[in-house]
């Protein structure tokens, strides 16, 4: 099947996923862990796009972390066999009963295996991009079902809005209101194995998140006060595997204006919350200077819903 029209967008931002809170509440008989998490998606991430017209089908990699996606460490190598971008293209093509004959480009700017959902976000961005190209009338519910086939984190990344995530990632409750603010993310250059972190959990039936306000969070102070009654249950086992996380959390917490510092997902990326983007950018510059080997990035988190004043 040949392409007959170009989509409105030729590229999609694959937003990073930050677990502001992550409680592990159980484990199913099939081994999957149950979670209760508040996930947020700042305006930063990888970028998935269409190749130039006439390009051969396949996936082209670029960006700081492209080499980490291929076994050879060479970004010019074949990344198609084990990559969620190509898996997403194949899954959507199969649903539409068509060939996945499309040239895709992935600019990999998020670190790999870092607890911020990079691969899942890439898959979600690919689904949105190719839905626009191949089947613009395909409804969001069907697309979410295809996302779930690709991994537990892909549906929340498809939504890419502040959301409470329960079950193994399939129960999503978007927040009605969420305050604008900014974050700084930092990773010490260490990939952490998610299965190994879960294996290190000493307790797997922890309490769920505290009740969330029915209408969301009215301001940043309310959000941070609620977060201080929560935790990331994966932080302790991750720190056992990667002690460097301790130093990242300490450095973020020491930044001027930091309201809360925590690890995201299974690590090793950590984040700090700031009231204003300018504060986050100043912290980013200071961390870059003090730790030139780290990946550090500041980004805004947009407001959701109506706010008074």
Image: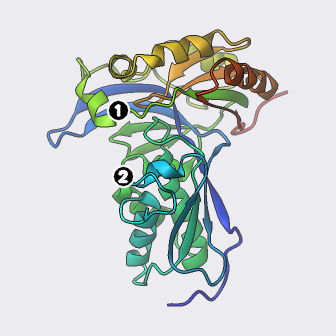
Give the structural element (helix, strand or loop) at label 2.
loop
Q: Which quadrant of the figure has residue 242?
A: top left
Seen from the viewer's position, the closer of residues 6 and 36 is 6
Disc number for residue 151:
2
Seen from the viewer's position, the closer of residues 88 and 296 is 296
Q: Are marks 2 and 1 in contact (CB under 8 Å)?
A: no
Residue at (39, 76) in percent of width and height: 95
Asked if residue 32 is positioned above or below residue 55 in the image, the reply reads above
In the rendered image, residue 14, in percent from the top left (x then y), is placed at 58, 52
Q: Which quadrant of the figure has residue 235?
A: top left
Residue at (68, 42) in percent of width and height: 43
Res 3 visible: yes
Seen from the viewer's position, the closer of residues 64 and 11 is 64
In the rendered image, residue 309, in percent from the top left (x then y), is placed at 85, 27
Asked if residue 269 is positioned above or below residue 111 in the image, the reply reads above
- Distance from disc 2 to disc 1, alpha carbons, whole Å, reads 15 Å
In the rendered image, residue 68, in percent from the top left (x then y), is placed at 46, 48
> Would you name the residue on which mark 1 appears?
35
Mark 1 residue crowding within 10 angstroms, few (<14) / some (14–19) / many (20+): many
Give the structural element (helix, strand or loop) at label 1.
strand
Q: Along the polypeptide, which appears first: circle 2 or circle 1?
A: 1
Task: Judge left or right: residue 109 versus residue 149.
Answer: right
Residue at (78, 22) in percent of width and height: 282
Asked if residue 162 is positioned above or below residue 218 in the image, the reply reads below
Q: Check the image and name the residue furthest to the left.
A: 29
């Amino acid at each position: 099947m040949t392409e007959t029209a170009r989509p409105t967008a030729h590229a999609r931002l694959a937003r990073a996923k930050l677990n502001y809170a992550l409680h592990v509440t159980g484990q199913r008989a099939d081994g999957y862990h149950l979670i209760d998490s508040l996930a947020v998606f700042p305006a930063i991430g990888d970028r998935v796009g269409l190749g130039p017209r006439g390009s051969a089908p396949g996936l082209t990699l670029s960006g700081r972390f492209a080499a980490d996606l291929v076994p050879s460490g060479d970004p010019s190598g074949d990344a198609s066999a084990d990559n969620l971008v190509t898996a997403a293209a194949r899954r959507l093509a199969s649903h539409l009963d068509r060939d996945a004959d499309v040239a895709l480009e992935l600019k990999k700017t998020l670190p790999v295996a870092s607890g911020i959902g990079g691969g899942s976000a890439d898959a979600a961005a690919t689904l949105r991009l190719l839905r626009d190209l191949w089947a613009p009338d395909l409804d969001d519910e069907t697309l979410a079902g295809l996302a779930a086939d690709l991994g537990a984190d892909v549906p929340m990344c498809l939504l890419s809005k502040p959301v409470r995530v329960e079950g193994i990632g399939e129960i999503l409750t978007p927040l009605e209101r969420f305050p604008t603010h900014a974050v700084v993310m930092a990773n010490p250059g260490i990939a952490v194995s998610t299965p190994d972190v879960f294996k290190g959990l000493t307790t797997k039936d922890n309490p769920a998140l505290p009740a969330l306000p029915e209408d969301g969070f009215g301001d940043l102070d309310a959000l941070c006060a609620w977060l201080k009654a929560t935790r990331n249950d994966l932080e302790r086992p991750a720190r056992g595997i990667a002690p460097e996380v301790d130093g990242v959390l300490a450095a973020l917490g020491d930044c001027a204006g930091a309201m809360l510092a925590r690890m995201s997902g299974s690590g090793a990326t950590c984040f700090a919350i700031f009231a204003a983007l300018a504060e986050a950018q100043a912290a980013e510059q200071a961390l870059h200077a003090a730790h030139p080997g780290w990946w550090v990035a500041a980004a805004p988190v947009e407001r959701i819903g109506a706010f008074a004043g």
